[in-house]
Amino acid sequence: MSSEEEISAAVNARKGKVAGMLSGDKMSALRVALTDPPVTSKNPDTKAINCNTVGDVITAVGESDIDSVIEKLEMAECDILMKYIYKLLGDTSHSDKSGVMLKWHAKLLKKTGMGSIVRSMTDRKTV
């Protein structure tokens, strides 16, 4: 089990890696952002940093590319992404991005069905 410091260091390293990828391969950037979310962290700041990293990728993907990006995701990645979409929608500091989040939600729901919503809402491991 990782310590809070290790989790925080991994999240900050991921943030830097993803930021460097955003000008290029956004699909890979999303995969990196969704990899190993800090579900064991008790530090809300660590979780917020990772959430913002995912949010940065989501908003960087053009509307016309959302379908192709979602199509390439594995089901586990879709479930993690759904958790982040709900978290971002619930955070008032991201209210300016809610339209984008709702577009992603609709397209993700089209791929995964209701199962992803149920899994993301009932999983005790929060992002």
Image (spheres, helix red, strand yellow):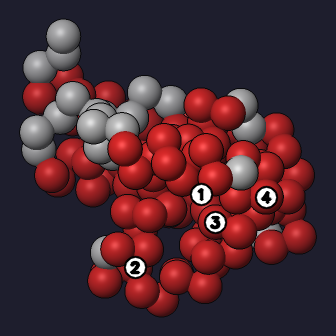
Q: Earlier in the sequence, mark 1 or mark 4?
A: 1
Q: Look at 80% across and 73% down and name the residue there.
A: 63
The residue singled out by tag 1 in the image is: 57
Residue 117 appears left or right of 127? right
Mark 1 to mark 4 CA distance (whole Å): 20 Å
The reply to whether callout 1 and callout 3 are in contact (CB within 8 Å) is: no
The reply to whether callout 1 and callout 4 are in contact (CB within 8 Å) is: no
Residue kind at label 2, given as amino acid type: His
The residue singled out by tag 3 in the image is: 105
* Residue 97 screen position, x and y as percent: 52, 81
Q: Earlier in the sequence, mark 3 or mark 4?
A: 3
Label at residue 40:
none
Mark 2 to mark 1 CA distance (whole Å): 14 Å
Residue kind at label 4, given as amino acid type: Lys
The residue singled out by tag 2 in the image is: 94
The reply to whether callout 2 and callout 3 are in contact (CB within 8 Å) is: no
Secondary element at image label 4: helix
* Residue 47 screen position, x and y as percent: 26, 48
Q: Residues within 10 Å of mark 3 (few under 14, many from 20)?
A: some
In the foreground, 35 or 86? 86
